[in-house]
Amino acid sequence: MLTDLTIKNVAIIDTLHICFKSGLTVLTGETGAGKSIIIDAVGLIMGSRASSDLIRSGEDEAVVEALFDISALPDIRQQLAEAGFEAEEELLIKRSLSRSGKNRIFINGGMSTLALLTDIAPRLINIYGQHDSQTLLKPENHLRLLDAYAGLNQQRDDFSRIFQRLNVLQGTIAGLDRAEREAAQRIDLLSYQSEEIAQAALKTGEVEELEEQRRLLANAEKLASGSGEAFERLYGGDGALLGQLRRISGTIAEISGIDHTLQDTAAAIEGAFLQLEDAAMTLRDYSSRIEADPATLQSIDDRLDLINRLARKYAPGIEAILAYKAEIDAELEQLLGMKQSRGDLEAERDHLESELKRQGSALTAARAEGALKLKQILEKEAHQLAMKGAVIEPTLEALAEPRASGFERVEFLFSPNPGEIPRPLAKIASGGELSRLMLAIKQVLPDSDVPSLVFDEVDTGIGGATSELVGKKLKNVAARQQVLCITHLPQVAVFADQQLRVEKLITGGRTTTQVRELDLNERTNEVARMLAGATVTDSALKHAAEMLAACTQQ
């Protein structure tokens, strides 16, 4: 709710600070005292057009600040936090107007955009009676009012969810249409690549094995001749090393029989002889096995060339090539399964279209029925609020294409006088009529997510018993939401929980406005003034006291 309003240098207002309470607050005072300026200041806080004409004469800047209690509005606190502003239980909105045109908006001390202000402020406070910022003047709000009255919010939400899902499906299917035109070429390419890799029958570690075999085959002659020559020198030829070592071993063995200290040496020479003999036999066998095999060598070269070619085309290394094949096989499976996926999506789409039509038709029928009931009850309320003979005509216009809200556009047309053709509210309703229409709606649809309401011009053109009825209805709304109301009627003012008197003063040769909260005695005097005019009589005071007492007892 709105707790504080500060106005500086706006029109005839010098400096003004107002503390508002919950319930019904009425602003009273002489015509021209500045009540409408206060409403204009609230309009600036809501994001209405800023004009330098509002700046007080002789000043360069005008400032309006409004403090709201948003402790019960978690959605707004979250939105502020996401936008980078402090989001405590209080919200301070400041708007400054400059003659230079450098107008600024601040939210909790941080500079803000007009877009954010116009999004947040109407969810905090609404003005009824002026042609800007009017809920009733926007036909898109009429559908919301009708659904709320007829209890159709859940049905509309269900319809909206189906509508959104259907839109997503249609977008997906359209994407498949484009994809299918490219899918055939893609399938051919991926199939060829997968088959080429599969035919190669690659194995992990194969390159290392092939390169080792190639190295041996490429050096077969060298390996054979080297191992054969080594065998001959060790064992097979004249003067072979093993023959000489055998003679040395016999000699050392013989003398070690004389000098036992040479026995270890004799044993070592014998061991060396045996090891070299084994090595010579191994070299003989190895040499006999090595053969030049040009065909096998060529086969290995061809295999390595194939692997290198696949690596250049697809990925470096056998592991990477096999991983690439796994990827394209998965894509192939997806592409080949596209028709099945499309079929499933089309089946779901057809089901949703049928369900959307069914729910939309039911919603249209319920709205038509609810519109007639709402028409009757609103007309009854309007007639009670000094709009005798007023006609409220609901229209449901079928849309060419459905929207998230349904199959139709809803607008309530209005005729204030019998015999006149109902027309859009923005073209025919006066400020007072708009204000009283919204008051009527608040009797029918009391729940609202806007915590503060301002009724301006609500008492225009009414009097007598109707005035008292307006006061009672405002009091009824104020039991649920904070209500601010400008009034010239004592029958309305006496229902207030808080009464503020707006006065125009001349100080130092300049006109300014001040606002005072009235106590019970001051309220009695103010109501008496509203009853009697310039000359307040004892009977007027007595009547005022009786009216206030009667409202207190209700």
Image (cartoon, rainbow, N blue to C red):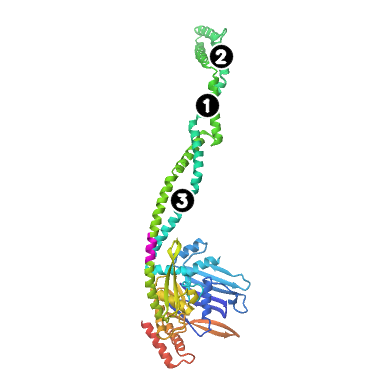
Residue 245, horizontal then vertical, whole percent: 54, 10
Q: Is residue 522 above or below residue 265?
A: below
Few, some or many C-alpha atoms within 10 Å of disc 2 (few <14, some 14-19, many ≥20)? some
Name the residue rendered at 43%, 48% in the picture: 342
Image marks 3 and 2: residues in contact by CB distance under 8 Å: no
Kindly report the distance in space between the C-alpha atoms of the residues bearing marks 3 and 2.
78 Å
Disc number lying in front (2 or 1) = 1
Q: Tell me which numbered mark, 1 or 3, is placed earlier along the sequence.
A: 3
Relative image position of residue 414 (x, y in whole percent):
45, 75
Amino acid beneath label 2: Ala
The magenta span reads 358-365
Per the model, the C-alpha gap separating discs 1 and 3 is 50 Å
- In primary-sequence order, the first of circles 2 and 1 is 1
Give the amino acid type for the residue marked by disc 1 in the picture: Leu
Q: CA distance from mark 2 to mark 1?
A: 28 Å
**Are discs 1 and 3 less than 8 Å apart at CB?**
no
Question: Residue under circle 2?
Answer: 230
Q: What residue sits 49% from the left and 43% below the top?
A: 183
Q: Which mark is residue 335?
A: none
Mark 3, other Cα within 10 Å: few <14 / some 14–19 / many ≥20: some
Q: Quadrant of the C terminus?
A: bottom left
Q: Nearer the viewer, residue 372 or 67?
A: 372
Residue density around tag 1, few if under 14, some if 14–19, many if 20 or more, within 10 Å: some
Is 552 in the magenta?
A: no
User: Where does residue 212 sit, x and y in percent of width and height?
Assistant: 53, 25
Q: Is residue 436 above or below residue 239?
A: below
Q: Secondary structure at mark 3?
A: helix
Q: Which residue is mark 3?
A: 173
Q: Residue under circle 1? A: 210
Of the residues under marks 3 and 2, which one precedes in the sequence? Answer: 3
The local secondary structure at tag 1 comes to: helix
